[in-house]
Amino acid sequence: MNRRGKFMILLLAAALLLGGCAASVPDSEKQPPSVSLTALQYEIENIAVDFSSMWYFRQIGEQTGVHVDFTEVKEAEWNSSVSLAFAKGKMPDLILRGSLDVEEYGVSRHLLVPLDEYIQRGLMPHYGARLENSGLKDQLTASDGHMYQLGFLISQDVNTNGHFFINGAWLDRLQLAAPETVEQLTEVLRRFRQDDPNGNGLMDEIPLEFTFDDNITGVYNLFSFFGLPLNEEFVYLDEKGTVCFAPEEEGFFTCLTWLGQMYAEGLLDIDFISQGSNIWAEKVNGGNVGMFSYWRLKNTALDPETAGHYRLLIPVHAEGTRACLPRNMDTVEFGAALTTDNRDIESSLRWLDAQFETENMLVSQNGAVGDTLILRDDGRYEVSYVPKDNGLYQSVPVICGQFFAPAEYYASVYVPAAHRQEKAEYCARYEQAGVLEKTCFKLLTAVSPKTTEETAAIAGLKAKLKAVVDAEIVAMVTRGVTEDGRAAFLHRLREAGSEAYKEIYQRVYDRRQGEK
């Protein structure tokens, strides 16, 4: 943008601020606030904001006639503050963002207002219509069939977390084709190690650079090469709808055998066991890495020059198997709930629903129209720029506000930034290649309602199982896979409760299927 263009935007922004920014948020039916409510409001850790005086909420207050006094709580204190709020004799009218155990506070203790009837009566026209058309209602429905929460969703239509990237500059320099099988990949990695693709005369290249236990930069993704969609919860559904526990499957041990080979040959950075994402990014940015997995390349921890050396790699497959990555899906987060001490339910819902009106909602995430957000000729909104140093949080709530935008609706009203379009392209290519699990594991872990007792049992069992699994990954990668070691590992899994873990998830899934 030229200097004159920037100057005109600054003038416009100043005019909007002087005018109360009324042009940036729809101002139909504005009225002085006549209802006052209280809210427990989630606030991200590194930003200090006064939500009660925030420009955005002043506009919403004028539109709805509702004023809200916020009590802001940082992420680290959120769970304890929620527990304390429900333990007091007087609860706040609203709980906003963060997280909330609706089974505990809604189903078991009856401290939350069921919202089904109010939504069906049309008291939330913006949110209600979008929810009805989204097909996501079941994610917000508790085990007793009621909805005690409003959802938060910024759909990115992402079908998997981590994509594989290989150093295209090294492939070209060594005149190598992109590998399609595990055997071909192994040979490429050996060439990366031996043939000095960075041209410095040293054998200092790191062919495989990963972290540990996740599906973005972690080695969990590498199990997909052997047909196993290993995720952080360890469970997935086979084609018959049976819950499987990934560390007990054949592909788990086949992959560990291969990883042990990579470690023995110096092709896998052994620091994957302990390094976090910051150290991982530092190494990748050092320019000596052959392959890794990551969310995308643009607008990440990678510097643009480094990112430019890499190209997307379709997951390779071992002989006799089909590559199978964990599938992602839109999962709805907690947005808002009303406590049973709420003094004015209809006003509360009116105030919340105003935030789901399209322009209001996009402003809450991106800033004022005419400044950081522009309305295009095609009727869609687009971000013009992002203020530095989290400056948006001083005027709009961003991820701490209300947002519900399923994929189809979001695409019709908003133009994604370039880095989001990049991710969408990668997802489309992986979908076309058929390298994703058929049924997303999150149907088990995130979508299917669970009772308070089931949730507690799953959490306890997972902690025990994860300790066994992660220790065995380290042992088998560094010392090798043996029949005796494999048998002992499977025994430890059973002792830690792998069968009970599967049974709970199977019961949860079967109940969901029976209710559909």
Image (tube, rainbow, N blue to C red):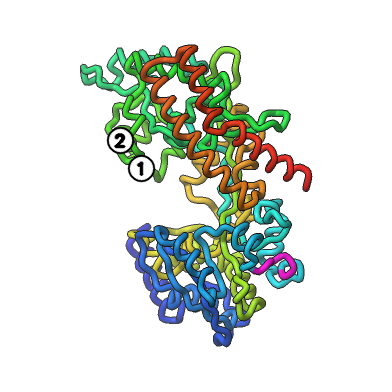
Badge 2 vs badge 1, beta-carbon distance below 8 Å:
yes
Q: Residue drawn at (60%, 53%), measured in percent from left and top? A: 332
Query: Mark 1 sits on what residue?
Result: 301
Residue 133 occupies quadrant: bottom right
Comes first in the chain, label 2 or label 1: 2
User: Over which residues does the magenta segment extend?
Assistant: 113-118
Query: Mark 2 sits on what residue?
Result: 285
Amino acid at pointer 2: Asn
Q: Is residue 373 something that shows in the picture? A: no
Q: Is residue 514 left or right of residue 293?
A: right
Q: Residue furthest left?
A: 201
Q: Is residue 314 left or right of residue 2?
A: right
Looking at the picture, does residue 96 appear above or below residue 202? below
Q: Total marks drawn?
A: 2
Q: CA distance from mark 2 to mark 1?
A: 9 Å
Work out whether residue 71 or residue 63 is closer to the camera in this orientation and state it: 71
Q: Position of residue 345 (x, y in %)?
A: 65, 76
Q: Residue drawn at (51%, 37%), measured in percent from left and top? A: 232
Quadrant of image for the N terminus: bottom left
* Other-residue count near label 2 (Cα within 10 Å), few / some / many at <14 / 14–19 / ≥20: some
> In the rendered structure, does residue 241 fall within the stretch colored magenta?
no
Q: Position of residue 498 (x, y in %)?
A: 57, 31
